[in-house]
Image (tube, rainbow, N blue to C red):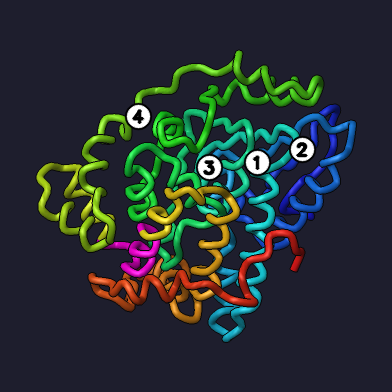
Amino acid sequence: MSDIHIRKTGRAGRITLTRPKALNALSYDMCLAIEEAIDGWRDDPEVAVVVLDAEGEKAFCAGGDVAQLYQTGKDGDFGFARRFWADEYRLNMKLHGYPKPVISFMQGFTMGGGVGIGCHGSHRVVGESSKIAMPECGIGLVPDVGGTLLLAQAPGRMGEYLGTTGARMGPADVLHAGFADYYIPEADWPALLAQLEENGDPFILDKAATPPPPGRLAEVQTEIDQLFAGETLQEVTEAVSEADGDFAAETLKSLRRGSPLSMACTIEMLRRLRGPGIGMAPALQQEYRFTYRAMERGDFLEGVRAAIIDKDRNPQWQHQSAVPQADVEAMLAPLGDNELKLEENT
């Protein structure tokens, strides 16, 4: 497949995304190809490590190929997107629990589906150009691909802030929020890749890591914890509206851009995940309940239209501000026979 280059080189199973002009956006076929590769390498004695990287300077993977999903949804076919999400989430689960080291090198933009393949491995590397975000609320979706687990595990209320605003994190911010493990200057990456192919030893990353340039999120952590202490979107929005300062004003602008339904559901999902049931499977299951309904009952089609198809940046969301709790509950209710089955290939 021309969009992805999969091969074994030395001790490494190599997966390289090769769609730089499309910012390495993840298509359905690419997801299935990655899954097939890691399934084959799981018990392969020749493969000591799995390495994910991408061509181009602008992005590791800027997200899933939502234009592909939009067209089928507009045509009234919700089944394709549901199948895509179910299969993608199964891949995310496999990467999260993989028995061998999974190493990702994430330059430039890593968003949405890119987080799903790049941020669940055991060794996650960022460099000076890295910008990671979960901007799904801006297109009427919720942070998915296991992103709600990462957000729920972020310090304090950082997850609520990142999930609702879609804020972009630089390398220091990424390490602070727990989306990556190592900062290594990008000029050093080719030599590290060659060494990984030669000896399959991920401990070389520990030796190569250096402190990142200063970030921003650690400085505003206390303010974020105060602003996002509320249990609902309405409580959070009120707190941010009443707060003084540039950060609160900037945050309020971001909150006014996203789908209110998506943001309200994101806050509820993170709240539920922080209990004793935290884990990748519950996170993905909860995400799928939303995405399963996103086209038919959510703001997804309108969000993609405004951001990507017509590019008018003027989405007409279902809710103007307040979102009834009943609407949140309805989007996250169990799906019965249609619940996500992580063990099945659909």
Q: Quadrant of residue 77?
A: bottom right
Q: Are marks 3 and 2 in contact (CB under 8 Å)?
A: no
Check disc 4 and give the amino acid type. Gly
Disc number lying in front (3 or 2): 2
Q: Which percent across, then down, holds residue 114?
A: 57, 49
**Residue 32 can be seen in this image:** yes
Spatial CA span between label 2 and label 1: 13 Å
Q: Quadrant of residue 69?
A: bottom right
Q: Judge whether 124 appears above or below 344 on screen.
A: above
Disc number lying in front (4 or 1): 4
Q: Which of the numbered marks, if any, corresponds to residue 55?
A: 1
Spatial CA span between label 4 and label 1: 26 Å
Q: Which percent across, then down, holds residue 242?
A: 10, 53
Residues in magenta, as a range: 256-267
**Structural crowding at the residue carrying mark 2, measured as other residues with C-alpha within 10 Å and reported as few (<14), some (14–19) or many (≥20):** many
- Per the image, label 4 sits on a secondary structure element best described as loop
Q: State the residue position of label 4.
A: 215
Spatial CA span between label 1 and label 3: 9 Å
Residue under the image location 64 percent in, 51 percent down: 92
- Per the image, label 3 sits on a secondary structure element best described as loop
Q: Which percent across, then down, holds residue 88?
A: 65, 59
Q: Which percent across, then down, holds residue 61?
A: 58, 48
Q: State the residue position of label 2.
A: 14
Spatial CA span between label 3 and label 2: 20 Å
Q: Horizontally, is 17 left or right of 285 in the view?
A: right
Quadrant holding the N terminus: bottom right
Q: State the residue position of label 3.
A: 58
Check disc 1 and give the amino acid type. Glu
**Structural crowding at the residue carrying mark 3, measured as other residues with C-alpha within 10 Å and reported as few (<14), some (14–19) or many (≥20):** many
- Per the image, label 1 sits on a secondary structure element best described as loop
**Which sits earlier in the primary sequence, circle 2 or circle 4?**
2
**Which sits earlier in the primary sequence, circle 4 or circle 1?**
1
